[in-house]
Image: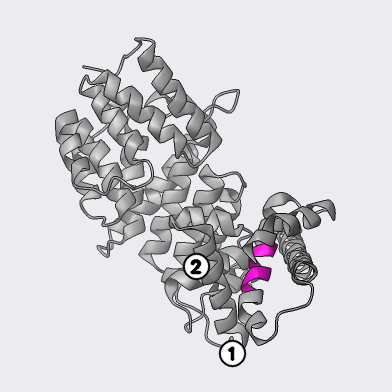
């Protein structure tokens, strides 16, 4: 059955589907085949897959069109007054975060059905194979197919979805960050929750640096090399204000901690003046593979590259961006040949083209004997 995938994708592309959408539709068709074919395989498997995949593609296009129409209508509306109805897109986030689903499945389903992300993008965010994520989303759809939607999901799951949508817009190839900020801002206006405020602060603090993150040719500019004069100080001030109010209530959560780290970066006039010791202390409050990887970098800045490498050695080398972090710390420790090899290795598994190109430039720089970060 899998051997038919390229041919079926090709048919959908010829009919007008873009490649990524065709892949998603064929994945859905394959899952449907696994479910139904054992009871009686069709005489024409390829034709069956094409028909089902094309229907799934059209359903996805209709759903996306409806979502965009809702967004356009919201854009055209006058500003909402306190007490007005909740944005229907935000309501859909809560409905998809159904109590009958696990948090992970609810997030995946919402990202696919409402957030507009492809299965591939969601899989990348969760660090799992695309086929695994396709199965997870399919199971979630089946679970809620006959569910009553009079019990919306919990706030924590919705926050996780909004965070992932923002991250895809911030670092991926689809501009969703502004929509995530808009929905989180609306949610903050209607709830009295510190983590909602923390998430909004985190988004604003990251978004404030967006103009400085890429060069004129789209090349990635690391935080240490960004022109801080291009950061949006108004947005930073709003984010810091939200964070301070949330932290003052002494009910600390994950998003508040991440926002505190972002605020320390935003507060430093230069990278050399960054309060790395305090950043390490905040990272100690987080417990995720990505946070521990970032903590190793912060330890390297606070206590020197050897300390950073020791922190890194405690982590799983298969983590995404592990080689890039190792390359940076080895370069700062003076092992330039090893750093160059690691930069090249990291480029082979980079999640985006700008990231890959940046890592290749770093490797080429060291191989050419230009190493300002060493010592």
- Residue 232 in picture, x, y percent from top left: 50, 35
Position above or below: 289 against 300: below
Q: Residue at x 75, y 69 (%)?
A: 59
Looking at this rendering, what residue extends furthest in the front direction? 43
- Residue 346 in picture, x, y percent from top left: 40, 35
Q: Is residue 79 visible?
A: no
What colour scheme was applied to this rendering of the protein? one colour
Secondary structure at badge 1 equals loop
Position above or below: 135 against 357: below
The answer to which of 336 and 303 lies nearer the viewer is: 336
- Mark-to-mark CA distance, 2 and 1: 18 Å
How many residues crowd mark 2 within 10 Å: few (<14), some (14–19), many (20+)?
many
Mark number, residue 148? 1
Magenta extent: 25-32
Mark number, residue 107? 2
Question: Magenta span has 254?
Answer: no
Question: Magenta span has 26?
Answer: yes
Q: Looking at the image, how many numbered discs can be counted on the residues?
A: 2
Which image quadrant: the C terminus?
top left
The answer to which of 323 and 164 lies nearer the viewer is: 323
- Residue 101 in picture, x, y percent from top left: 48, 79
Which image quadrant: the N terminus?
bottom right
| Dots 2, 1 in contact, CB < 8 A | no
Quadrant in the rendering for residue 6: bottom right
Mark number, residue 338? none
The kind of secondary structure the magenta stretch mainly shows is: helix
Q: Residue at x 56, y 63 (%)?
A: 111
């Amino acid at each position: 059955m899998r051997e038919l995938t390229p041919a079926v994708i090709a048919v959908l592309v010829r009919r007008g589907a873009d490649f990524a959408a065709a892949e998603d539709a064929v994945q859905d068709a394959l899952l449907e085949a696994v479910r139904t074919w054992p009871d009686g395989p069709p005489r024409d498997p390829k034709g069956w897959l094409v028909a089902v995949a094309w229907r799934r593609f059209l359903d996805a296009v209709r759903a996306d069109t409806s979502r965009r129409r809702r967004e356009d209508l919201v854009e055209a509306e006058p500003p909402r007054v306190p007490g007005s109805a909740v944005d229907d897109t935000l309501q859909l986030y809560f409905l998809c975060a159904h109590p009958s689903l696990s948090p992970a499945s609810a997030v995946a389903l919402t990202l696919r059905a409402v957030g507009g992300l492809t299965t591939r993008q969601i899989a990348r965010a969760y660090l799992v194979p695309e086929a695994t994520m396709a199965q997870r989303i399919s199971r979630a759809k089946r679970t809620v197919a006959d569910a009553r939607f009079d019990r919306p999901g919990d706030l924590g799951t919705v926050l996780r979805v909004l965070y992932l949508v923002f991250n895809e817009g911030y670092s991926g190839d689809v501009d969703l960050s502004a929509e995530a900020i808009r929905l989180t801002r609306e949610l903050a206006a209607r709830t009295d929750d510190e983590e909602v405020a923390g998430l909004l602060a985190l988004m604003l603090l990251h978004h404030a640096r967006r103009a400085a993150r890429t060069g004129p040719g789209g090349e990635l500019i690391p935080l240490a090399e960004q022109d801080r004069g291009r950061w949006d100080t108004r947005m930073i001030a709003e984010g810091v204000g939200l964070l301070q109010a949330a932290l003052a209530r002494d009910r600390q959560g994950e998003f508040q901690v991440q926002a505190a780290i972002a605020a320390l970066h935003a507060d430093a006039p230069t990278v050399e003046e960054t309060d790395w010791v305090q950043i390490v202390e905040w990272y100690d409050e987080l417990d995720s593979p990505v946070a521990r990887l970032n903590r190793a970098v912060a330890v390297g800045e606070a206590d020197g590259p050897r300390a950073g490498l020791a922190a890194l050695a405690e982590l799983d080398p298969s983590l995404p961006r592990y080689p890039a972090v190792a390359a940076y710390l080895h370069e700062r420790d003076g092992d330039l040949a090893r750093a160059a090899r690691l930069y090249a290795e990291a480029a082979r598994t980079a999640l985006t083209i700008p990231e890959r190109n940046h890592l290749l430039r770093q490797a080429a720089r060291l191989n050419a004997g230009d190493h300002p970060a060493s010592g």
